[in-house]
Image (spheres, rainbow, N blue to C red):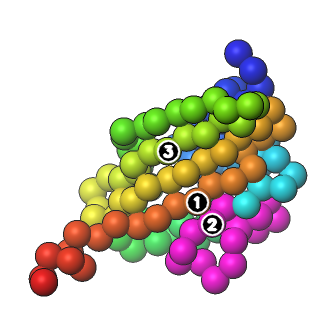
């Protein structure tokens, strides 16, 4: 197995365990995490603060930060592992899509979106 597969697994572990050490070990130096709730993309230097804020947000929503990935699609394309997946924060309405790119030097990009059926159900 190439490094990109192992690093992608470590990255997922880091999120499941809320372990910043694992997340940083799994990310490339040019890592960018793009969350539309954030005014600027998150990089390696700001990932710890983002994780702290994420934990606070999940607690406000009544969650323990447990989440589930589903409907994963993976493509290994010219040395770049590309993953698309649906994510759900357990016991909350918070869910969306994630798009993650990983090279052999680590995860270098993740973009997430949010989905809220309640916003559209009142039409």
Other-residue count near label 2 (Cα within 10 Å), few / some / many at <14 / 14–19 / ≥20: some
Spatial CA distance of label 3 from label 2 is: 14 Å
| Circles 2 and 1: CB atoms closer than 8 Å | yes
- In front: 10, or 108? 108
- Start-end of magenta stretch: 33-47
**Residue pictured at 79% horizontal, 59% vertical:** 44
Q: Does the magenta stretch include residue 14?
A: no
Other-residue count near label 3 (Cα within 10 Å), few / some / many at <14 / 14–19 / ≥20: many
In primary-sequence order, the first of circles 3 and 2 is 2
- In front: 103, or 7? 103
Q: Is residue 45 magenta?
A: yes
Spatial CA distance of label 1 from label 3 is: 10 Å
| Circles 1 and 3: CB atoms closer than 8 Å | no
**Residue pictured at 84% horizontal, 56% vertical:** 30
- In front: 91, or 71? 71
**Residue pictured at 39% horizontal, 59% vertical:** 96
Disc 2 target residue: 34
Disc 3 target residue: 84
Where residue 70 sits in the image (x, y, percent)? 37, 40
Among the 4 quarters of the image, the one containing residue 25: top right
User: In the structure shown, which secondary structural element does the residue marked by tag 2 occupy?
Assistant: strand
Rendered position, 64 above or below 120: above
Note whether residue 66 is visible.
yes
User: In the structure shown, which secondary structural element does the residue marked by tag 1 occupy?
Assistant: strand
Where residue 109 sits in the image (x, y, percent)? 69, 53
User: In the structure shown, which secondary structural element does the residue marked by tag 3 occupy?
Assistant: strand
């Amino acid at each position: 197995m190439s490094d990109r597969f192992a690093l992608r697994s470590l990255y997922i572990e880091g999120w499941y365990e809320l372990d910043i050490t694992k997340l940083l070990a799994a990310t490339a130096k040019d890592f960018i995490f793009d969350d539309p709730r954030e005014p600027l993309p998150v990089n390696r230097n700001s990932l710890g603060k983002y994780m702290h804020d994420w934990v606070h947000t999940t607690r406000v929503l009544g969650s323990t930060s447990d989440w589930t990935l589903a409907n994963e699609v993976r493509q290994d394309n010219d040395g770049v592992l590309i993953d698309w997946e649906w994510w759900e924060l357990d016991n909350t309405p918070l869910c969306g899509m994630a798009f993650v790119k990983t090279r052999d030097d680590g995860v270098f990009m993740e973009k997430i979106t949010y989905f809220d059926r309640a916003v559209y159900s009142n039409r």
